[in-house]
Amino acid sequence: MKTIKKSGLALIVISLILSALWFTNQSVIPKDVSWDARGFPVERSPAGIRGLNQAGEVSGSSKDNAYGQLHGWAMIWTLMGWILMGMAAYFLQPLFSKTIGLFVMAGTAVCAAIHLGWVDRTKASFKAFEWIKMTLAMAALVFATILVGSCVTKGPGANFNHYQNEFMGQTNVIKKPVIIDFSADWCSPCRKLDDITFHDKKVVEMAEKDFVLIKVDLTSKGDPVYEKLLYLYDIKGVPTIIFLDKNRKEIKELRLVDFEPPALFLERMIKAKQTN
C-alpha cells in the first residue's frame, strides 16, 4: 500500500514539475498580436494591422504597446509556473523526512524569489509591473524565512520510545499510563500532531512527567510484531493514539483518530491520569 501511494504521488509530482517547466519557458503571445516582416510585434484590428505608418514602418508606440502586452502575459505564466513548482514541492514532502521536506519548500520559495526579483528581466509598459515583481519576490523570501525559522526555533518535542516487546514488559514495572501513537511518515495529520501537539510545552511537560510514550511507526508494513499490535488494538488507520491505564488496559473513550490541538489533547491526558 505504501509503495502504491508513493508511486501515485511521484507521478503527480513529475507531472506538476513538467507542467511548471512548460509554463515557465513558453513565450505566450496574445491573440491580438501579430508580427511584421522584420520580426516586430504589431496589433491586429478588424480593419487590418495597426501600428504601421504610411511608409510601412512600425510606429514606436504600437511596438511598445505590443511588447508590453507580451511581457505582461509572460510574467503571469511565469508566476503560474512557480505556483505549480510550489505545489510539486508540497506534494513531494511526504516522500522525505519532515526537515528535508520543509527545506524543499523553503528552497523552492528562495529560487522563485531570486528568479522573479533579480534573474528575470521582463519589462512591461505599466509602471506597477516592477513593483509587483519585487513584492512577489520579497513575499517568497519572507515565506522561506518563516519556514526555516519555524524549524530552527521549534522547541524540543515529546520523547517517544519506539515499540519493542521488551520495552513493553519493562513498562509494567512503571506505574504510569501509556500513550501509544500509531503513525506513518506519509500521514499528514500524524505530521501535524508531531509538529504542533507533541511540541507544545505543556503537553511535553506532562507527557515526560506522568506518562510512558510509545510510537509505532507504520510507514513500512509487513512487520509481524506491528501486525499483531494492529489486530490486538483494532487499529484501522493512522493516526491512531490510544491510552492505556496503569493495568495496561485501553481507555477506549480516549482513543484519538485525527489531529487534535494541544489544549484538547492536554484535557485527554488529564482524563487518562485520573483513570484508575
Image (cartoon, rainbow, N blue to C red):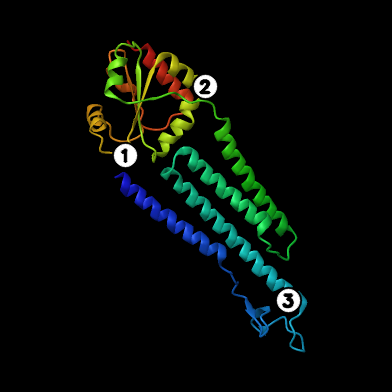
For label 1, the SS is loop
Q: Badge 2 is on which residue?
A: 201
Left or right, 167 with reference to 45: left
**Image: 66 above or below 238:** below
As measured in the structure, the alpha-carbon distance from the residue carrying label 1 to the one carrying label 3 is: 63 Å
Left or right, 156 with reference to 125: left
**Image: 268 above or below 46:** above
The quarter of the displayed image where residue 251 is located = top left
Look at the image and tell me whether residue 251 can be seen: no
| Number of marks present in the image shown | 3
Residue 164 lies, in percent from the top left, at 30, 25
For label 1, count other residues whose C-alpha is less than 10 Å away and answer few (under 14), some (14-19) or many (20+): few
Left or right, 52 with reference to 215: right
For label 2, the SS is helix
Which mark is in front, 3 or 2? 2
Q: Earlier in the sequence, mark 3 or mark 2?
A: 3
Q: Residue at x 31, y 13 (%)?
A: 246
Q: Residue at x 64, y 53 (%)?
A: 114
Q: Badge 3 is on which residue?
A: 62
Q: Badge 1 is on which residue?
A: 220
Q: Earlier in the sequence, mark 1 or mark 2?
A: 2
Furthest toward the front, the residue is: 166
Residue 134 lies, in percent from the top left, at 69, 53
Q: Amino acid at mark 1?
A: Ser
Look at the image and tell me whether residue 217 can be seen: yes
Furthest toward the bottom, the residue is: 55
Q: Residue at x 59, y 57 (%)?
A: 79
For label 2, count other residues whose C-alpha is less than 10 Å away and answer few (under 14), some (14-19) or many (20+): some
For label 3, the SS is helix
